[in-house]
Amino acid sequence: MDKRKVVLPDNTALPAIGQGTWYMGERSSDITQEVRALQAGIDAGLTLIDTAEMYADGGAERVVGKAISGCRDQVFLVSKVYPWNAGGQKAIEACEGSLKRLGTDYLDLWLLHWRGNIPLEETVRVMESLVKQGKIRRWGVSNLDASDMQELWDIQGGQACMVNQVLYHLASRGIEYDLLPWCSTHHIPVMAYSPLAQAGRLRRGLMQHSGILSMAAELGVTVAQLLLAWVIRHPGVMAIPKASSVEHVQQNAQAANIVLTQAHCELLDSFFVPPVHKMPLDMV
């Protein structure tokens, strides 16, 4: 099947749906199932895997390392650095720590997890240094709003940024007002984390919404598949849902083939209204 792709500024094509790993690696009893799910995702074409040094204090990176052992070359591997580690020697040590836990000698993409006190200029410098050393192939950012992205863009070397990873799902649409248009204009893909809403009231509101349930039934898909198809409907947006079962991973992969009509999108807009003014960047 032909699956949606998103192209990075360096012309690298990635699957529009990848695999997230937040909350993986927290319980040793779950690791075997988590590894199996990630491997099933790779087999299904979800070869983009996102993790972070923060997740389970490196535990998620260890799970990913087990999953990609023997198939590293098939995977586009993304990890993220704490903001307080995003400069100088700390950044080098953090990168090397991630590489060790992942069992690889390079990352395809390394992201600043969110903005902290270390100047963006310093983060850009160390990212470029790690690219030269071959420890990372590319770098990007996460949880940066439109004004932060413009500030980054104006820094020497800042335009080498490959992606911005932010919270985005049907019940959290603030980025559509200014950040998503900014990224589109500057050809920076957006990587949507928690595309199904992480937990709690918002997730229940999406998964149990009568109109969404009705639309999913009409299309013959699950609610999760419908919500993923909605997130990636916009060119240049990819989604990284976490799925720790083989069945859910396979369902996620199939969502890339769902085509929503304008009528579907307009109906969803009536359930969860697009933003009409600037909103604070949503983060979890």
Image: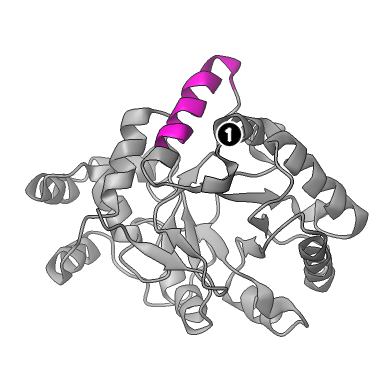
Tell me how the rendering is colored: one colour
Q: Is residue 33 magenta?
A: yes
Quadrant in which residue 200 is drawn: top left
Q: Amino acid at mark 1?
A: Gly
Image spot of residue 198 (x, y percent): 45, 42
Taking depth in this image into account, of 225 and 199 the one nearest to the observer is: 225
Q: Is residue 146 above or below residue 165?
A: below
Q: Is residue 42 magenta?
A: no
Q: Is residue 193 left or right of residue 169?
A: right
Q: Residue at x 67, y 81 (%)?
A: 153
Q: Is residue 107 left or right of residue 186?
A: right
Q: Which residues are magenta?
A: 27-41
Q: Residue at x 43, y 76 (%)?
A: 177
Give the tally of numbered discs: 1
Residue on which the image places disc 1: 70
Q: Is residue 138 left or right of residue 90?
A: left
